[in-house]
Amino acid sequence: MSGDSELVLIWKDKMNNIDALMLNAPVYYAVDFPVKLEPPFYAYITLKGKEANYRVHVTEVREYEPLEGMMRRSNKNLKTLLYLEEIQEIASIPLNEFRKENGEEIKRVSKYSYGTLTLITDFELKKFRDMTDSERKIYEMAIKDYGVELPFSIVSEIAKAEEKYDIKNTELKRIIDRAVEIYKKRLVDPYEAVGIVGAQSIGEPGTQMTLRTFHYAGVAEMNVTLGLPRLIEIVDARRDPSTPMMTIYLDEKTRYSEDGARELAKKIESTLIKDVSDIVTNITDMSVIIRPNKEEMENRGVTKDNIVESLAKIKLKTVVEVEGDNIKVRLSEPSYKNLNRLSTEISALTLKGVKGIERAIVRKSNDTNEWVIYTQGSNLRDVLDMDGVDGRRTKTNNIIEIANVLGVEAARNAIIYEALDTLQQQGLSVDIRHLMLVADVMTQKGYVEAIGRHGVAGQKESVLARAAFEITSKHLLAAGVTGEVDELNGVAENIIVGQPVTLGTGAVVLIYKPKKR
Amino acid sequence: MEYTRFEKARIIGARALQIALGAPILIHIPGDMYDPLDIAIYEFEKGVIPITVKRSK
């Protein structure tokens, strides 16, 4: 797409029209509304009027006239002919990401509308071709003299040092010589048993970790799982960590104002009905009575009307009556079972704030001098949606949530970060590559998988490898009945068969090399 | 071609076995060298062992 925020056309259409368009594109399409945009442009089609589901490339716009082979949006009032070059199904974009010409959000599209879509494109990734001249010089020197492609981070570090300390050419040569030497030493040979090495390198420091939950240093009154329990939690890929936490960074506007940060924290912190009132179940007339606590309500900025409003969310059929200070919720049809359900449902109702976030604490960050919100409880999706939050730096310790909201690659990074962080807090240093391997293995199928007692979740391919570990006869019998084939690729099966394993020396194939004459 | 440490070990190992079983030595060796493994390492360093590795792609 040319330009970041071009005006685009959005219209609503029926599924069968789109199906036909997908089959016939490129095609002329007659629509029953005027189009003021100059072709070529992109247009979006929405199915339900809430999110854009298809993108079309329009290359021609003209007045309506009957044409052979054209398609129609409706049967009457046709006004414009669009030539649709291409139609693509896209990952749906919520319509509120489009802005009307007056800057407002688009809420719904019932027929057609215009809007601009601003794409976030100022995110910069440093790429190869972006190397500065001095970096390129170092990079090419290493290739020419040693045949080694140094990693970008090392190259840029040397380049920085070269500038800072005004290094002479001969000295630079020696620095590169040392860098290449150390780099080569740290490289892993092909067929190295990295998994075993990684397991031991994480396992040994693991024995030195504490088994207890501690208070998090610096942030008052927040309980955080640390040490071995946390590491197990990460590797287990639990749906919810035992102490979910978020670190919410703020955007430029609110970052340096304490009041702004506190206000946002108040908005994020969720208040339940049970936080501001007593809930009493009255069995005699099948009702639940809510007795609001005025002091608490004032503290949290909630009114009685808020409570009454939120009661509309209850799924059971109820009658709500306000009796002085108290609120009475009566079941329409008496039932003990439903009464019990009602009282649990009422106590779990959220009055305000982000669901799942129990507490929000505002702290000043030590190194950047900005205000940061730390929370107990995590809800990444809703927090990222809030104004004033810097979504790029905001993080949570719930890895599965990250996978759902931001994708597996983000989850992979989170696993590495969380595991490294837990180990470092205990004063243990583990090479990051071991953790990267763990994270890679856990996420390589496209979703987060646990590593448990049996290795990576999911079945092992080889029958013999499975039989070697617990319930031997069951696996062998099942394999015999179904006629499974063992390719003998893994370690365990090759040992059973009595062959060298395909690792290290065992993976090398020797051939005879006749002497050159 | 540079050998990895596994390949080096494998080549020297195979050659040492040949020498131990009585294969003729391909190069003049120092007079106080008797161990087949030492001889194989010596030969490897001089680059005279007629063995190489086949690497999978």
Image: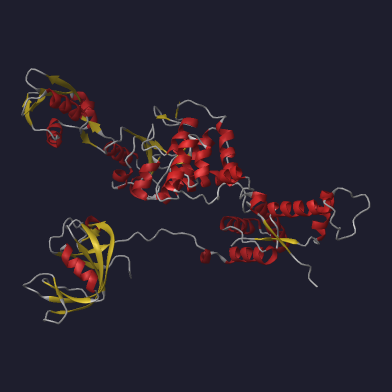
- Residue at the (59%, 38%) spot, across then down: A200
Quadrant (top left/top right/bottom left/bottom right) for the C terminus of chain A = bottom right
Name the one closer to the observer, B37 or A106.
B37
Q: Is residue A260 above or below residue A127?
A: above
Residue A341 seen anywhere in this rendered image of the structure:
yes
In the rendering, at what x and y percent does residue A501 appear? 62, 48
Quadrant (top left/top right/bottom left/bottom right) for the N terminus of chain A = bottom left
**In the picture provided, is A481 more to the left or to the right than A75?**
right
**In the picture provided, is A378 more to the left or to the right than A196?**
left
* Residue that lies at the very extreme toward the top in this rendered image: A284
In the rendering, at what x and y percent does residue A291 appear? 15, 22
- Residue at the (21%, 76%) spot, across then down: A27
Residue A453 seen anywhere in this rendered image of the structure:
no
**In the picture provided, is B47 more to the left or to the right than A291?**
right
Label total for image: 0
In the rendering, at what x and y percent does residue A347 appear? 20, 28
Name the one closer to the observer, A84 or B18.
B18
In the rendering, at what x and y percent does residue A329 appear? 10, 27
- Residue at the (10%, 70%) spot, across then down: A74
Q: Is residue A153 above or below residue A302?
A: below
* Residue that lies at the very extreme toward the right in this rendered image: B31
**In the picture provided, is A456 more to the left or to the right than B11?**
left
* Residue that lies at the very extreme toward the front in this rendered image: A481
| Quarter location, residue A282 | top left
Name the one closer to the observer, A127 or A330.
A330
Instruction: Name the colour scheme.
Output: secondary structure
